[in-house]
Image: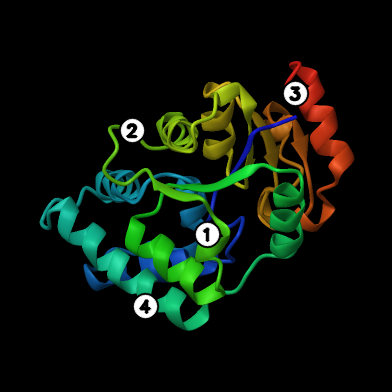
């Protein structure tokens, strides 16, 4: 059986993607840059500094330092999360299930620690996790596997003994690069995308997670 379950946060545990889009559009608009909410899907799952670098290059905008733009978005999305954050369907059931099977549980997110605290704090979930690992400050963000490998090390388990829950394609790539099993729960606009064939399983919702699926994935590579 698996030893640990690693959960992405934004778009998986917390219905925060609309809030991220709102914050990004708001901040870039304050600089006169017409970023649309529909554009934000292209950078879903990336670390925020990489998102800012991407859009600044896209717009050819260099008047303001990346760090300033990042901080403005962090402040905006943190405030929105504290006001509006809601859990995605099936979160409580999924956490109860993995806990009932003796797995250690961690968040492994691209978001900054302040954002993780704001989102999970709003939902009353902070105490549900043995660790909360942020890619903020690491050498690499997703799709690099560093954040998942750091989570496994923090929990004291082997990467191959972990199952990852992800909504974004960048996160799925990172999980597979870490040699972990991955269950994808794509957002509505990504459902049916052929890219998700890379995941070991795809669910419509965390509410669809079953003990049988965990057992099946654990058996694929002989995890006990």
Which residue was labeled with disc 3?
A: 224
Where residue 152 appears, as percent x and y from the top left, is 49, 33
Q: Is residue 82 above or below residue 169?
A: below
- Evaluate whether residue 62 shows in this view: yes
- Evaluate whether residue 7 shows in this view: no
Q: How many marks?
A: 4
**Cα–Cα gap, marks 3 and 1:** 42 Å
Which residue was labeled with disc 2?
A: 140
Where residue 139 appears, as percent x and y from the top left, is 28, 32
Q: Nearer the viewer, residue 64 or 20?
A: 20
Task: Point out the frontmost of discs 2 and 3.
Answer: 3
Which of the marked residues, 4 or 3, is nearer the chain's N terminus? Answer: 4
Left or right of 222: which side holds 71?
left
Which residue was labeled with disc 4?
A: 79
Left or right of 182: which side holds 140?
left
Q: What secondary structure is marked by label 2?
A: loop
Which of the marked residues, 3 or 1, is nearer the chain's N terminus? Answer: 1
Q: Are marks 4 and 3 in contact (CB under 8 Å)?
A: no
Q: Quadrant of the C terminus?
A: top right
**Cα–Cα gap, marks 2 and 3:** 30 Å
Determine crowd level at label 3: few under 14, some 14-19, many 20+ residues with C-alpha closer than 10 A. Answer: few
Which of the marked residues, 2 or 3, is nearer the chain's N terminus? Answer: 2
Q: Are marks 3 and 1 in contact (CB under 8 Å)?
A: no
Quadrant of residue 207 within the rendered picture: bottom right
């Amino acid at each position: 059986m698996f030893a640990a379950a690693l959960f992405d946060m934004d778009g998986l545990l917390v219905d925060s993607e609309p809030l991220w889009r709102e914050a990004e559009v708001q901040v870039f608009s304050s600089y006169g840059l017409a970023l649309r909410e529909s554009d934000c899907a292209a950078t879903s799952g990336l670390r925020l500094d990489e998102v800012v670098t991407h859009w600044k290059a896209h717009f050819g905008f260099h008047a303001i330092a990346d760090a300033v733009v990042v901080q403005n978005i962090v402040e905006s999305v943190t405030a929105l999360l504290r006001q509006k954050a809601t859990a995605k369907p099936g979160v409580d059931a999924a956490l109860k299930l993995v806990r009932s099977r003796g797995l250690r549980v961690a968040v492994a997110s691209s978001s900054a620690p302040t954002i993780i605290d704001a989102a999970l704090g709003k939902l009353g979930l902070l105490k549900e996790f043995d660790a909360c690992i942020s890619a903020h400050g690491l050498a690499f963000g997703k799709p690099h596997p560093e954040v998942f490998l750091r989570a496994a090390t923090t929990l004291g388990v082997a990467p191959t003994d972990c199952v990852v829950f992800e909504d974004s394609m960048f996160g799925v790539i990172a999980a597979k690069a870490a040699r972990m099993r991955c269950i994808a729960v794509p957002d509505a606009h990504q459902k049916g995308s052929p890219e998700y064939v890379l995941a070991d399983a795809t669910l419509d919702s965390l509410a669809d997670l079953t003990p049988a699926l965990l057992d099946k994935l654990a058996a694929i590579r002989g995890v006990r």
